[in-house]
Image: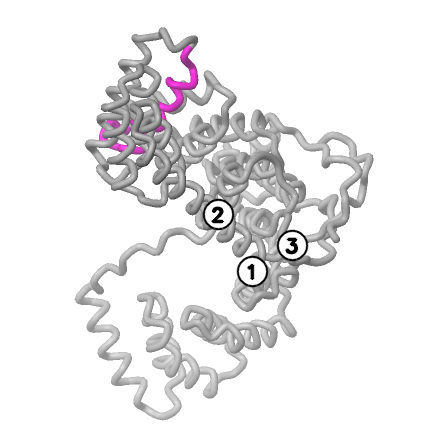
Amino acid sequence: MLIALSAPLLIDAQCQPTADSATWQASATQNPSTAQPQFFDEPKFTVAGVTDTSNPAGHGTAATWRTKEALTKETVSLAKGEASPASPPAASSIATEKSLREAAHAPGNFDANHRLGKLLLDEGKAREALPYLEQASRLNPSDYANAYELAQAYANAGDYEHARANVRALLAHQDKAELHHSLGDDDEKLGNSLEAVHEFQRAAELDPSESNLFDWGAELLLHHAPEPAIEVFTKGNRLFARSTRMLVALGVAWYSRGSYDQAAACLCQASDVDPNDPNPYLFLGKIQDIEAIPSEGISERLKRFASLQPESASANYYYAVSLWKQRKSPEDTTTSAQVESLLEKAAHLDPKLGAAYLQLGILYSERNDFPKAINAYQKAIKANPQLEAAHYRLAQAYRQTGDKSKAQHELQLFEELSKEAEKQAERDRHEIQQFVYTLRDQAAQPQ
């Protein structure tokens, strides 16, 4: 059973950094080597355990729940970062590696083994790095840098048990943030979610860096603990007001909690912090795609996104949807024509963007142009056969044209896809353990 929260966490939902954090940010920009954020104060929540639940706390329809899950996973990916393709090693690096390989064959050469292992690890060759780092460890077990790099090599090679054992051995002698963070990563990979979040928390307490705070909050969000995640991301935003991913994560946490207005405010602010970063716009677009509530603020940002990235299919699509939801009535032909133009451009830029064809079909259906609507829905299904709404809409269009057999066929496909999507959602719910948490101060004062 989940512990019920008798009162929500009282947090500033406006996504506005405090004056102190703005001052600190200015100082950090001028002299990043000396700027240090204030110590992260004790959180007002306690993560007590995990539970496997098939009915996690949430708001709205199954489609909304799936959107929350997708946004959460994408938020976590902001913490991990996308692996960039390894660049070909420079000639000097190749020469260095060759000389180090030769030197590493000499018995007792700690420096050569360590340097070669580190070089290979930095190049993304964890498995190749392991023998050299292990040899260096045998030659000098007390060398911290080599021991830490050996643990990283084990983790990068997928041997999380060895990685965790090495990190724990280091922690027995040194209580360092990077060790706790590394241990948190290893525990999460091994399915020890509760231990992982405690390690991420300890890393943030020892070193309240942007990455440590973000990863702590992301771990909480991943395990369906939006209130604690909101607290962490809010404080992270106060310390790192220029971090767009912190604001994006805060917005997703509010959305997971069911607070749409706060989510939109945070994501809009994130897009203002760095207008050229596509992530805030993409998150905004995905939320407004599922939510019925129109927002002028969202529409203004998505207009800017389309202006800054005119060749982005997503930018054109999301701006079109925002305009569609801002219409005053179906008789607004000017807006309808603009929406049609944007959707056609999005579909041209990315023919596999089934959602653009789906929205075009909806537009044509509203005009009672069912032949064009049917054609658009068919293209949507061709681009994405799993698009449930396209099958449903196509069934309705066939019914309007009197083709009852085709309508029934599409409706049956819609029902089958909906059932399969719900089964997959059920499997996803069981895969991620949900944190049980309590608030330390139910009557917490506003921050």
Residue beneath disc 1:
181
From this viewpoint, is residue 27 visible? no
From this viewpoint, is residue 388 visible? yes
Of pointers 1 and 3, the one earlier in the residue sequence: 3
Q: Is residue 315 magenta?
A: yes
What is the number of callouts on the image?
Answer: 3
Residue extending furthest toward the left: 91
The residues bearing labels 1 and 3 have C-alpha atoms spaced at a distance of: 27 Å
Report which quarter residue 9 is drawn in.
top right
Q: Residues within 10 Å of mark 2 (few under 14, many from 20)?
A: few
Report which quarter residue 164 is drawn in.
bottom right
Q: Residues within 10 Å of mark 3 (few under 14, many from 20)?
A: some
What residue is shown at x 36% (from left), y 32% (from top)? Answer: 395
Q: Nearer the viewer, mark 2 or mark 3?
A: 2
User: Magenta segment, which residues?
Assistant: 309-327
Tag shown at residue 53: 3
The answer to whether 85 is drawn above or below residue 105 in the figure is above
Q: Position of residue 359 (x, y in %)?
A: 33, 27
